[in-house]
Amino acid sequence: MVHSILTSGSTYWPFKKYFEIYNRSIKDPEGFWSEEARKLEWFKTWDKVLDWNPPYANWFVGGELNASYLCVDRHVKTWRRSKVAIYWEGEPGDTRVLSYSTLYREVNKFASVLLNLGIKKGDRVALYLPMIPELPIAMLACARIGATHTVIFSGFSAQALADRVNDTGARLLVTADAGFRRGKPLALKRIADEALEMAPSVEKMLVVRRANIPVSMKPGRDAWLHEMMEKASLFVNPDPMDSSHPLYILYTSGTTGKPKGIVHGTGGYLTFNHSAYRWVFDIKEESIYWCTADVGWVTGHSSIVYAPLMHGAAIVLYEGAPDYPGIDRWWDIIEEYGVTIFYTSPTAIRMLMRFGEEPIEKHDLSSLELLGSVGEPINPEAWTWYYKHIGKEKCPVVDTWWQTETGGIMISPAPAIECPPLKPGSATFPLPGILADVVDEKGETMPPEERGLLVIKAPWPGMFLGVYGDPKRYVESYWSKFPGIYYTGDYAIRDKDGYYWILGRADEVLKIAGHRIGTAEIEDAVVAHPAVAEAGVVSIPDPVKGEAIVIFAILKEGCSPSPDLKAELKALIRKSIGPVASPEEIHFVSKLPKTRSGKIMRRILKAVATSASIGDLTTLEDESSVEEVKKIYEELKKEV
Ligand code: WTA
């Protein structure tokens, strides 16, 4: 894979292949995407490539396919049946290697278990599992019979699990006795039991034995997976699914307290990811591909399960923490399995960077061919360290920008199609078929080097089908700011060479260690405490996690601030959301700056938290009184 880095003075025109493909894709999107879709295997070809009725897109209308067929059956018909599909490593060091034919057998049996439990096409199945092979197996088994899976990150609390399960109305929950994290079993079954007290739609719970810890099984409701697998058939037909059949629902944070169930379809989603992973990662059947994300996030769906398995690559799946038992655990895994493509987050890179090069030098990382980054902006310093010390200056680093909603990578270098040179910290250019732009509040294109809002001006096959059970929210959150245009919620600039630099969120969503958390979700959790009257949440920059959470809380009459209260609030947040939302700072204050309509002005809180000036307040005129806001700002500064 040829790549170079753009240094000042060097020119990059023309990079014919990328621009040729890109221009063709924009000129004739339907012709372009139908060519891409033909690279999959369809049971029935579509009648129409795209039905675009803004803001609803229907891709490959009338086409039929099956995600599980594409990820396993297709390979077992070839020599790949005997090649590795999954290299799994448990945190304690236990390992499992699954060939495509083993994966095929397990997926079929699991699908049979689902059918035996009465699960049918169209049902929702919730998966609350650690990073063990049963997680991708369960996803593919659901896809095989047309049940829509919803994976819930195993770091979420019982409450967060119950909220998501309730929103989908799932009939089955799949969990494990426990998963290992930093040497200790995390008792998932126990958390699931607590969640199911609050989730009446769930009729059955299937439990994977992973850690061999004692659990209580509720008669009539709970079943062990290994017992059910013994009675399972070895073949279940991969049912043809309509191209727009919902493959999965995945919850993500937005600007209100309630997470959104992002729904992805089948044909468009798979086509888009199949193409994007070829362009960006040059993924092939011989690749040994490791994405360190948790399957609980969208990165895990597209980058661990669907895209690499469609390509017949071997994936590495690792259960535990990056620094356990030693700081070189990841480098050890790369060496052990001969990983060729490594994909991680800027937070992880910054965390590992702090330990210097010594832990790396102990390992042979020469198998690596390409490195990727995702989830948050990567600072040029971290990019350069990654390039130099992990990739030894021979692997391109692809900074890939995308979202749960986009389903797959949208803006990224694409070394496999001769993209322009890389610039450390830039996601470079949109992938073929992606009509991106940076605009002002009115939707006008911004001049180079000026910050604006990132938008996508034409439908793409990976786009989500909607917000589960909430069509209004789909339209309002994404398509109302600029009608017919997808609003990403991110700030970006395009430099004078046309390269995109993603600057972070423009809305009330935070990115903590790459995890999306809404300020409103945290505020809701905090005000649930009997001593708290009101709360406002903002973030401050964090050298490792990118952003860290700061809470401003007003206490109720008669309640006084104390370290114990802070500890209680922290515990409450862990309980209602999970440890990912733990705050860095909590400030008890007497007032919060608000607009006339009562909306908290987070910009002012942020200025207080970061000791910045509040800048120009004239634009606030119709929101609140400038004098009043200034007064509150000064008071808060003293209180904090
Ligand atoms: C941020 C993760 C800068 C962005 C796949 C986006 C990024 C949000 C990048 C989506 C990147 C993701 N550079 N920012 N390369 N990738 N983001 O839904 O703010 O968990 O809107 O999807 O992550 O987060 P999500």
Image (cartoon, rainbow, N blue to C red):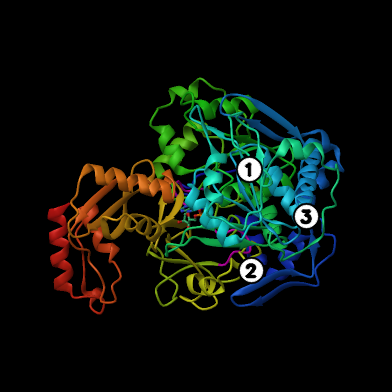
- Start-end of magenta stretch: 422-435
230 or 222, nearer to the observer: 222
Give SS at disc 2: helix
Q: Residue furthest top?
A: 362
Disc 2: CA contacts within 10 A as few (<14), some (14-19) or many (>=20): some
Residue at (63% x, 39% y) in the render: 217
Taking the image as shown, residue 224 lies to the left or right of residue 514, namely: right
Residue type, numbered disc 1: Lys
Residue type, numbered disc 3: Ile
- The spot of residue 228 in percent (x, y) is 76, 40
- The spot of residue 142 in percent (x, y) is 72, 52
Q: Say if residue 186 shows up in the picture.
A: yes
In primary-sequence order, the first of circles 1 and 2 is: 2
Seen in the picture, residue 569 relative to 331 is either above or below; the reply is below
Residue type, numbered disc 2: Ile
The label on residue 218 is 1
Seen in the picture, residue 185 relative to 46 is either above or below; the reply is above
Taking the image as shown, residue 549 lies to the left or right of residue 155, namely: left
Q: CA distance from mark 2 to mark 3?
A: 35 Å
Residue at (29% x, 51% y) in the render: 550
In primary-sequence order, the first of circles 1 and 3 is: 3
Residue that numbered label 3 is attached to: 145
Q: CA distance from mark 1 to mark 3?
A: 26 Å
Residue at (85% x, 64% y) in the render: 44
Residue that numbered label 2 is attached to: 26
Q: Main secondary structure of the magenta part?
A: loop
